[in-house]
Amino acid sequence: MMIFSSGLYVHKNMKSKILNYLKEKNDFVSGQDISRDLQVSRTAVWKYVKQLQAIGYDIEAVSRKGYRLIAQPDKLFPDLIQDRLGTKVFGKKIIYLESTNSTMNDATRLAIEGACEGTIVCAETQTDGRGRRGRNWVSTKGQGIYFSIVLRPHIPLSQAAALTLVFAVALSKAIRVTTGLEAVIKWPNDILISKKKVAGILMELSAETDHIHYIVVGIGLNVEGKAFFGLPQATSLEQQLGQGISRVQVFQEILRQAEEHYALFQKKGFAPIARIWREYSATLHQQVKITEARSTTEGIAIDIDDQGALLIQERSGRVVRKITGDVIHLR
């Protein structure tokens, strides 16, 4: 289903039926034909077309010819995302919001209430988007992809941290497939293009010692925009491409890649994901500094282990394992 700030919109209602009808015909269709085939009054057809136009659908209306769909809005409407998506779980239930404080908060609430795996909350903008360690994620309206997804994986708790790297691989692959840009991963959760941050991943969970109740993964991706005032190390797909790209197309590919790599991780473990991660990594073999609340570690990033922890070789030769922290790539 789909939730607008103004109320509830149920997927496959009459607006969706009219929209799909226009897509299938791909030409002018008379109001009389729509009325007859969908068993709705011509006045209602006119009203629903006006509502579709109001939310961004370019529908041409010509006297004695009828209606024709010219273009769809580049908004993250569930109908558009689910059209030929091809996933089995991810995106089967999408909750869309024009604005929210944080999709992570919304998805967490739904997870607590029992939402099924693959449930997604996406928004055009977030007023209090969250990054790691309480940082804010700038969510400019209509210029990015901001969403959170509910997971209920059957994995040991010790493997949960590796899911951030699973989604980092999937997100990098989706960007590469849709844009041709060389998206790379800065451990543990940043996606870079040309050494600038284009996306981030946040993971939160509820678990007991032997059982994961749920995991919520949030992703913020800058798709449009050419200036990031106050954020010189930020970039967007548009800025890197030199032209715009459909957010719907990119979002669909993210969901396809995420479902594929998540399934691979659950079926065969972290090893096949780790191989791809090493290929895409911007951190391995770099001199790095990792800062945590009470300590700082500096050395060469030599590898990741089977739980996604970063292995740092200090100058003394000692290898230190880090599961979290802020990473700086040193020159």
Image (tube, rainbow, N blue to C red):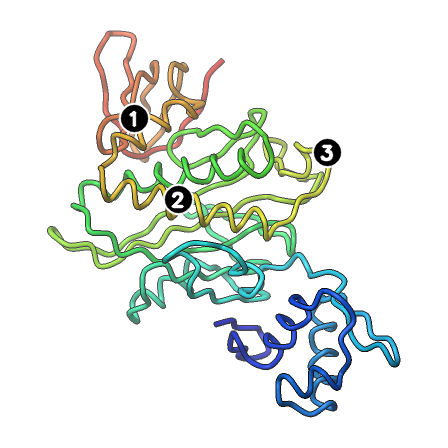
Q: CA distance from mark 2 to mark 1?
A: 18 Å
Q: Residues within 10 Å of mark 1 (few under 14, many from 20)?
A: many
SS of the residue under disc 2: helix
Q: Badge 3 local density, few (<14 within 10 Å), some, or many (20+)?
A: few
Name which of mark 2 and mark 3 comes first in the sequence. Answer: 2
Distance from disc 1 to disc 3, alpha carbons, whole Å, reads 34 Å
Q: Which residue is mark 3?
A: 242
Q: Earlier in the sequence, mark 1 or mark 3?
A: 3
Q: Amino acid at mark 2?
A: Arg
Which residue is identified by label 2? Answer: 133
Mark 2 crowd level (few <14, some 14–19, many ≥20, 10 Å Cα): few
Check whether the beta carbons of the residues at disc 1 and disc 3 lie within 8 A of each other. no
Percent position (x, y) of residue 58? 76, 65
Return the x and y of residue 15 as percentages of the image width and height. Answer: 62, 78
Residue depth check, mark 2 versus mark 1: number of the one nearer the observer? 1
Q: Mark 1 — residue?
A: 310
